[in-house]
């Protein structure tokens, strides 16, 4: 009887805290994947371009070393102030730099999925469609991969997802925007900008849509736009100065960005590469196509470099082609039923702009910047699939999700097996990694559960908007205090 009561109590708490349970489950999956790919893998931490053109060594050093050489963050302007404090905070509990980096990556991926779920739910009021679409995002190769290796791109997706989520909350409430709302929106835009500069332009388009929707008065709309723009500029200047003081080797105010942009444009424009990239934009972000390993003798250790195989059979791309043809057909067939046509237009425009930016600056590998556009595409698909019968919804989305779940883990296992000299033995530590990830996830979940209980007990009126805003304020305070501490501890003051 006692065991049954314990099981019933656990079951009841999981149901009551279903979103927390979903978050912990996602964290467990991504953290396990990260440990398997990276934990014992010296090559991935000591070299760049080892797997799919990622700069793992540089990013790992930026994440963990306060006094290191950070001159290459010019294309990711605020990654130091946004991510490094979180890594150092996690390290106080895990006592492992590698595990801490991987835990923060898993945290970012989990937040992305849940934030997009709430965004889709707020825009559509359809739980089934929102759940399945966000599972497709959560098990996409882009999210699984970038939540598992030392790179910044998953945080770009995370901040975009949080931005869209807050937009959806404000849109659903249909209240005039306050200065507090505009500041949080500006802060989220700067967070996205800090990971990848083009994100700010995409976010600003969606902000303009929200301002227009909530303000019938043109003067008020213009006023809100100018105030938000002013806040963005002030935050950019403030964070640039503080980061330069805290991390003396980091560039400030977008130094050398123009030179790098010119280098990319000159280096990458090849019609054949652009054609291949265009054919893979809707494929590799969702599931991995064939990978290819080549021997690389650069650096201190001879290792295998993993790239996407240039020639891809049409059969490997067929599931994505069928899925997107069905999606477009559903959109056209149900066009008159959609209430948020202007939102769908804005999301489509943002998606197309991101595709154009990929072609302009890095056409040879659109996968690398897939998190710049994937969250917008997912919300757009959430809106499209919100107006179809459940049977069709489940058949289409579950079929594609099932193909992802079958395909993507095998590709991650391929990377783990061939990524480094002696890497074949690492895969046999998978059970140990599962155990370590499980213990970490349970510990992390327990802390979140206690924290959630504390909030519910001590705050009488606590809706999703106040919850969201409070945690954004906490994060703002956290990185600001961390910067001030770093300035006096390691900076030039």
Image (cartoon, rainbow, N blue to C red):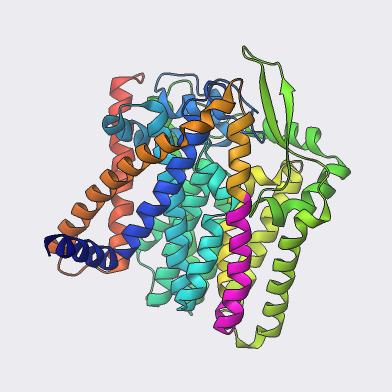
Residue nearer the viewer, 123 or 389: 389
> Does residue 321 appear in this view?
yes
Up-down: is 6 above or below 302?
below
Front in this rendered view, residue 390 or 340 = 390
Q: Is residue 100 above or below residue 441?
A: above
Q: Position of residue 366 (x, y in %)?
A: 70, 46
Residue at image coords 42%, 67%: 118
Q: Residue at x 61, y 56 (%)?
A: 404
Quarter of the image that includes the C terminus: top left
Residue depicted at 72% across the width and 62% down the height: 319
Decide if residue 78 is in sight here.
no
Residue 264 on the magenta segment:
no
As for residue 390 lying within the magenta part, the answer is yes
Give the prevailing secondary structure in the magenta stretch: helix
Q: Which residues are magenta?
A: 385-407
| Relative to 440, 226 lies left or right | right
| Foreground of the two, 406 or 17 | 406
């Amino acid at each position: 009887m006692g065991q049954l009561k314990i099981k019933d109590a656990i079951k009841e708490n999981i149901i009551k805290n279903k979103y927390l349970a979903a978050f912990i489950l996602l964290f467990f999956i991504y953290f396990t994947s990260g440990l398997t790919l990276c934990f014992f893998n010296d090559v991935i931490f000591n070299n760049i371009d080892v797997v799919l053109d990622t700069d793992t060594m540089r990013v790992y050093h930026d994440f963990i070393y306060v006094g290191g050489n950070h001159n290459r963050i010019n294309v990711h302007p605020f990654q130091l102030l946004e991510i490094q404090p979180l890594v150092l905070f996690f390290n106080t509990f895990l006592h492992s730099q590698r595990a801490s980096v991987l835990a923060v990556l898993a945290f970012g991926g989990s937040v992305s999925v849940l934030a997009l779920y709430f965004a889709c739910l707020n825009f559509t009021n359809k739980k089934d469609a929102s759940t399945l679409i966000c599972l497709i995002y959560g098990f996409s190769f882009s999210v699984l991969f970038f939540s598992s290796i030392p790179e910044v791109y998953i945080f770009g997706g995370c901040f975009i997802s949080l931005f869209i989520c807050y937009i959806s909350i404000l849109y659903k409430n249909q209240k005039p925007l306050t200065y507090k709302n505009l500041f949080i929106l500006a802060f989220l835009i700067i967070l996205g900008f800090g990971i990848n500069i083009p994100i700010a332009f995409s976010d600003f388009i969606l902000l303009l849509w929200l301002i227009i929707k909530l303000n019938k008065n043109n003067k008020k709309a213009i006023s809100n736009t100018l105030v938000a723009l002013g806040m963005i500029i002030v935050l950019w200047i403030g964070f640039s100065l503080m980061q330069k003081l805290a991390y003396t080797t980091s560039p400030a105010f977008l130094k050398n960005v123009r030179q790098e942009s010119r280098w990319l444009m000159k280096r990458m424009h090849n019609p054949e590469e652009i054609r291949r990239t265009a054919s893979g934009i809707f494929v590799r972000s969702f599931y991995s196509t064939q990978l290819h390993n080549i021997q690389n003798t650069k650096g201190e250790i001879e290792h295998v470099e993993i790239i996407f195989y240039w020639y891809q059979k049409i059969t490997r791309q067929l599931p994505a082609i069928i899925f997107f043809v069905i999606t477009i057909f559903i959109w056209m067939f149900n066009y008159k039923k959609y209430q948020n046509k202007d939102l769908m237009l804005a999301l489509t425009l943002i998606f197309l702009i991101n595709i154009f930016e990929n072609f302009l600056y890095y056409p040879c590998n659109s996968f690398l910047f897939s998190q710049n556009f994937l969250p917008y595409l997912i919300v757009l698909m959430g809106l499209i699939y919100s107006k179809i019968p459940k049977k069709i919804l489940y058949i289409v989305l579950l079929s594609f999700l099932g193909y992802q779940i079958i395909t993507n883990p095998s590709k991650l296992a391929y990377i783990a097996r061939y990524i480094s000299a002696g890497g074949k033995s690492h895969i046999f530590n998978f059970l140990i990694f599962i155990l370590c990830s499980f213990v970490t996830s349970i510990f992390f979940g327990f802390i979140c559960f206690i924290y959630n209980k504390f909030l519910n007990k001590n705050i009488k009126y606590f809706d999703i908007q106040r919850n969201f805003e409070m945690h954004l304020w906490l994060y703002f305070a956290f990185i600001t205090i961390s910067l001030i501490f770093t300035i006096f501890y390691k900076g030039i003051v």
